[in-house]
Amino acid sequence: MQTEEEQRLDIYTVSRLNSEVRFLLEESYETIWVEGEISNFAAPHSGHWYFSLKDTSAQVRCAMFRGQQRHLGFTPKDGMHVLIKAHVSLYENRGEFQLIADFMEERGEGKLRRAYELLKQKLAAAGLFADEHKKPLPAFPKQIGVITSATGAAVRDVLTVLQRRAPTIPIIIYPTLVQGKTAAPAIVNAIQLANQRNECDVLILTRGGGSLEDLWAFNEEIVAHAIYNSHLPIVSAVGHEVDFTIADFVADKRAPTPSAAAEIVAPDQTDILLLLARSQKQLFRLIQTVLQAVKQQLGWIQKHLSQLHPKRQLIEKMQRLDMIEQRLAQLIVRVMTSIQARINASLHLLHRHTPLQQINNMQHQLNLSQQKLHTIMRENITKQRAALAHLAAKLDGISPLATLQRGYAIATTSTHVILRNTNEVEIGDELSIRLAEGSLACVVKKINSPHHH
């Protein structure tokens, strides 16, 4: 035990006291979350932030160094309600108790924003925002469904735009709560009901503007899955243009405002009327073309039918029969003419080859030949006579007759061979002795040989 004297002698310096207190504070408290309102906010050139955090009855000094600020999505200001993650410390130089902040978020909205970011990451990873799951919107919807509060400004905006753009398209409103703790299940029920009834081609999920807390029902996971599972395409238009909810990311199309959603979903009747006018002209031209083609085809069919009509065929066959008859008559004439010509040719040929004709021809030839022969014979006789006269004259000189005239005779055998030698006859042969005048028939009685002479 220290005596009072000894305790009095253990005197702290301010520095030592502050250092030990700081150590005790930092050891006693691990990281803590503190909620309060910012006041006396200061941001000197160093980049560090200094401020007080207060509630209704107390305040505490705080510091947040530059390195911890980059993760924040906002700049603190006086009056802002925040939640900080910090460790307890002491600023030794001034002996002031303080908190060193590592993280800060806006209280209420800040908490919601953190939940929003976590769910957004989770659903994005699960593929609920993927483009391949987004359904196309119908170009000309037959009926439009609106899921919203029946009393809000959003439904009036949507109906006004739809009335102006497409007054002929029926609209079905599926009323639902759009704010508060029971709003999310109510929205899910409305989406499921619209899908079960299946009476619309497209749905608009909408509400007016508000704080993140007001819009929170559209950031609930059950709503995201209901939109994702809807077989009807959904256009999301929640809050103002700057507000983005989970519903916007899952929906098949996001519109910046309720009015914009109505414009996206409904075709403008002016455009439709123009399109209809163009289509009408095209259709009219097409009908005219088709009618012209059909008329032409009908003409061809009628023509073809008239050609196939029994009466027409009968007339054609009668005409053909007349033509065949005419051709047959012509053919008979030609055949008869041809046969007559052949008969005439044959008769002519027969006439040329008849025996009488041949006889006449041969008789004529014979007469000609006879005339020619007589002429030749006359000529030959004349020539022969001349030659004979000449020869007779010559012969006369050497003629035996002349010799006979002089008293000689010519002895010939019975075969008229002139005898020149006694050897040529025998006793008893008959001989003819030619004299100058006449002849003698003699019989050999005696032969005198030459050597006897």
Image: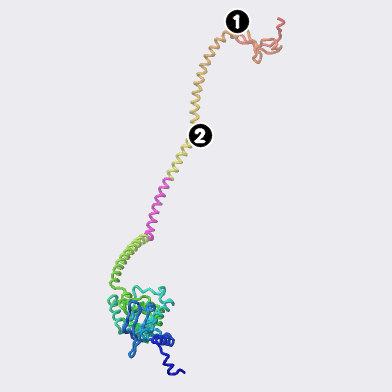
Residue 15 is inside the magenta segment: no
Amino acid carrying mark 2 in the image: Pro
Compared across the picture, whether 234 is left or right of 428 comes to: left
Question: Mark 1 highlights which residue?
Answer: 406
Q: Which residue is mark 2?
A: 355
In three-dimensional space, the C-alpha distance between marks 2 and 1, rounded to whole angstroms, equals 65 Å
Q: Find residue 305 and report its image quarter.
A: bottom left
Q: Position of residue 359 (x, y in %)?
A: 50, 31
Residue closer to the observer: 127 or 286 = 127
The kind of residue tagged 1 is: Arg
Give the mark, 2 or 1, whose residue is nearer the N terminus.
Answer: 2
How crowded is the residue under tag 1: few (<14 C-alpha within 10 Å), some, or many (20+)? Answer: few
**Disc 1, SS:** loop
Q: Are marks 2 and 1 in contact (CB under 8 Å)?
A: no
Q: Is-magenta flag for residue 324? A: yes
Please give the range of residues in magenta: 306-334
The quarter of the image holding the C terminus is top right
Mark 2 neighbour density, 10 Å: few (under 14) some (14–19) many (20 or more): few
At 50% from the left and 27% from the top, the residue drawn is 366
Name the residue at 52% across, 14% down: 386
Residue in front for this viewpoint, 423 or 148: 148
